Amino acid sequence: MKVTQHLWFERDMEAAIGFYTALIPGSAVHWVTPLPADTPSGPAGSVRLAGFTLGDQRYQAIEAGPLNPFNHAFSIMVECDTQAEVDRLWDALKEGGTVEQCGWLRDRWGLSWQILPKRLGELMTDPDPAKVKRVTEAMLQMVKIDVAGLEAAAKG
């Protein structure tokens, strides 16, 4: 059994998935194809499908005009090993988009992302509840997650 996330783009699907796969190591666009002209989805060539991977996750995308815009009910979370990786992805994805609290942002296509350092997960699962509380309170004040700020909060 295979599980694949599916994304519906109103427009610019190829630009979006090309951008995403260029940002995340181990990613690739595997195929892009228009739906045949004899489908009820729209004029010939107006609806296209694509298959791609982001890191170790499989995706399929469709570009078929407006339906339901992306929202927070689905986001792509990327766990980064270093602050430099967080900064690189954050800066690229926020271009033309909007930033939000706690490591969330929306890219120029409206897709929600969570760009998080691996260290956040480690600190949030520490056996010391006081440390977890301090880290949580610090994280809730951040827009882009800052590892140094998390570490300072952990130390008290």
Image (cartoon, rainbow, N blue to C red):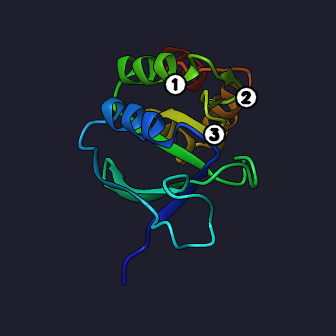
Task: Name the front one of labels 3 and 2.
Answer: 3
Residue to which mark 3 is pinned: 112
| In the image: residue 124, left or right of residue 25 | right
The picture places residue 35, in percent across and down from the top left corner, at 46, 64
Classify 10 Å Cα crowding around label 3: few (below 14), some (14-19), many (20 and above): many
Q: Nearer the viewer, residue 51 or 92?
A: 51
Q: Which mark is residue 68?
A: none
Query: Residue 36, relative to residue 84: is it above or below?
Result: below
Q: What residue is shown at x 55% (from left), y 73% (from top)?
A: 39
**Cβ atoms at labels 1 and 3 below 8 Å apart:** no
The kind of secondary structure element at disc 2 is: helix
Where is residue 3? Give x, y as percent: 43, 73
Q: CA distance from mark 1 to mark 2?
A: 20 Å
Q: Earlier in the sequence, mark 3 or mark 2?
A: 3
Circle 3 SS class? strand
Please report the residue visible at 50 percent of the width from the left and 62 percent of the height from the top: 5
Q: Amino acid at mark 2?
A: Leu
**Which residue carries the number 1 mark?**
93
Q: Nearer the viewer, residue 6 or 136?
A: 6
Which residue in the rendered view is the most extreme toward the bottom? 1
